[in-house]
Image (tube, grey):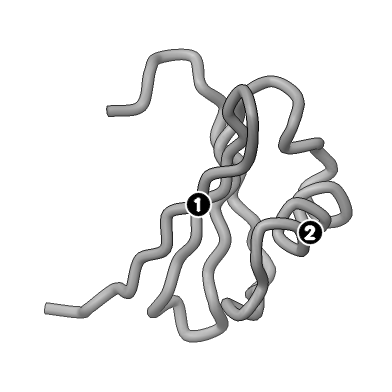
Amino acid sequence: MIPAGVRIFVCTEPVDMRRGFDRLAQTARDIVGQDPQQGGALFVFANRRATRMKVLWFERNGYCMLYKRLHRA
């Protein structure tokens, strides 16, 4: 469950899903314009075909990432 008040930023440009923690954090700074280490926000990235998604956030002592492969019903 995502707590109320958490900001969610969605990157509208497709992202290479081979990117790891540091490159996604840099993408958040460059494209979204927000620093992932400030404010406890979630950053959502998808690939070109929108079949894979990564969500990046920063907790007290490091980055966390959720990686999901999406299926169409």
**Front-most of residues 26 and 13:** 26
Q: Helix or strand or loop: what does disc 1 sit on?
A: strand
Q: Which percent across, then down, holds residue 57? A: 58, 39
Q: Residues within 10 Å of mark 2 (few under 14, many from 20)?
A: many
Dividing the picture into quadrants, the one containing residue 3 is: top left
Residue 28 is labelled as: none
* Left or right of residue 39: residue 4: left
Quadrant that contains the C terminus: bottom left
Residue 30: percent from the left, percent from the top? 88, 54
Q: Residue furthest bottom?
A: 49
| Residue for badge 2 | 27
The residue most toward the top is: 5
Amino acid type, mark 1: Met
User: Which residue is rendered at x = 77% and y = 64% of the image?
Assistant: 23
* Element class at badge 2: helix
Reply above or below: 18 against 29: below
N-terminal-most mark, 2 or 1: 2
Q: Label 2 is placed on what type of residue?
A: Thr
Compute the Cα span from label 2 to label 1: 14 Å
Horizontal placement of 9 versus 2: left or right? Answer: right
Residue at image location 60% in from the left, 46% down from the top:
43
In percent of width and height, residue 16 lies at 65, 80
Rendered residue at 27%/28% (across/down): 1
Disc 1: which residue: 65
Q: Give percent across and percent down for residue 17.
A: 57, 77
